[in-house]
Amino acid sequence: MKSQDEIIYLDHAATSPVAPEVTEVMLPWLRAGSVGNASSLHSLGRRARAAVEDARDQVAAALGITPLEVLFTSGGTEADNQAIKGLVWAAREAGRGTAIVTSAIEHPAVLEACEWLRDVEGHRLDIVGVGTDGRVDPEEMLEAVGPDTAVVSLMTANNELGTVQPVDLIGPALAERGVSFHSDTVQAFGKIPLDLHGWGITAAALSAHKFNGPTGVGVMTLRRDVDPHPVLHGGRQERGVRSGTLNVAGIVGLGAAAELARGRLADEGIRLTTLRDRLIEALTTLDGVTLNGHPTERLPNNVHVAVTGADAEATLLALDRAGIACSTGSACQSGAAQRSHVLDAVEAATDAAHLRFSLGLGTTEAHIDRCVAELTRLLVPATAGAI
């Protein structure tokens, strides 16, 4: 087995390495003797609270929103569940409607939350399909919205295909109708500019480990005039919406990672787009390899391809043995070996291996060229049925 230093890591969409600058600011909160509950009134508690609020300011600045709109969670999954369920329950209590509209390619944290509300509580759920490029038609999604719609949820960018959705068109239209709009921005933050206020987004989800922060900590943004019902009950931390003792070390790391992402967004976006296009161009010149997702409206770090006649798991493992770490799709479903709902939604070929290469900090031209060379080498036996 190759050592970690020998592996070319092209699976940043699953999780990204913690940036050294992030580790550095977290260490004081992880060392023995560091103590302080951010809800305590003594000096150590106030010190922890100050660190949390500094991180809240960093996230708010990175998103162009106010600190009051930043609520810390355990990650994107919790943020998605809290936003969708909490907004639906609040709308139901206020008599504003109980129906939900979402897309067929949402993250499982969104789709399964919506399906639970439908199956357990009886809410109507309308799931809007997408084109073969993975994009929602704005008119079709807005047509699904009725007077009883409580929440619309549409991710900013798909976690598998990398396709960027027209949230900038759908959100303002929903705001005019007074319908809450939730967007999972987990894959998009730090990769493309976000305009939560301009897009009319009521609530959004972020996860630190997707932008070179620690695992186990995330953000739910929440507009100041919105008061969803809590999913967790307890200490009423985070505006009374999210209860639980705050993860000070993780939050400090998240704040630092958000500030880093903000500072490098423009330059890193250009760099990653150049590398992405280099990889797409090289791979799609190979026989039997085609690009999945939208050709241009996609994240700068995502390359998702279909390899006709190859087996996905065997190809991935062969690349792994060659020192290339990539993915057959989302890593968010534990032990999942079945075809993803995203591939079904875009009617992707069933006789092909679908591979996701996601780039990030540390990815170089040499890594891209090595990836192309290894996949090219594998494709000869693959077309002969050896993979």
Image (cartoon, rainbow, N blue to C red):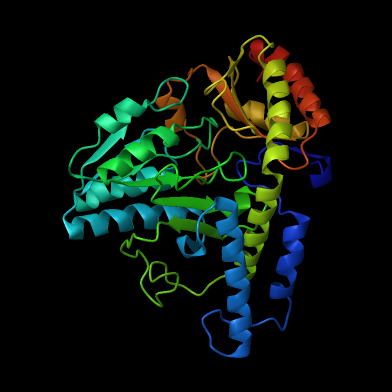
Asked whether the viewer can see residue 346, the reply is yes
Residue sitting nearer the eye, 23 or 382: 23
Task: Give the tally of numbered discs.
Answer: 0
Residue found 78% across the figure and 31% down from its top: 322
Name the quadrant containing residue 361.
top right
- Quarter placement of the C terminus: top right
Image vertical order of residue 96 relative to residue 319, above or below:
below
Report the front residue among 227 and 313: 227
Q: Is residue 202 left or right of residue 12?
A: left
Q: Which of 329 and 383 lies nearest the eye of the viewer? A: 329
At a point 42% along the width and 67% down the height, the residue shown is 242
Residue 190, given in percent of the width and then of the height, sits at 62, 45
Residue 78 is situated, as x and y percent measured from the top left of the image, at: 44, 57
In percent of width and height, residue 33 lies at 72, 84
Image point (68%, 36%), residue name: 269
Left-right relation of 136 to 245: left
Identify the residue at horizontal 76%, vertical 58% (top origin): 21
Viewer-nearest residue: 92 or 115: 92
Tell me residue 136's x, y (percent): 39, 28
Q: In which quadrant of the rendered image does the N terminus lie?
A: top right
Indicate the quadrant where residue 115 lies: top left
Asked whether the viewer can see residue 78, the reply is: no
User: Looking at the rendering, which quadrant does residue 373 occupy?
Assistant: top right
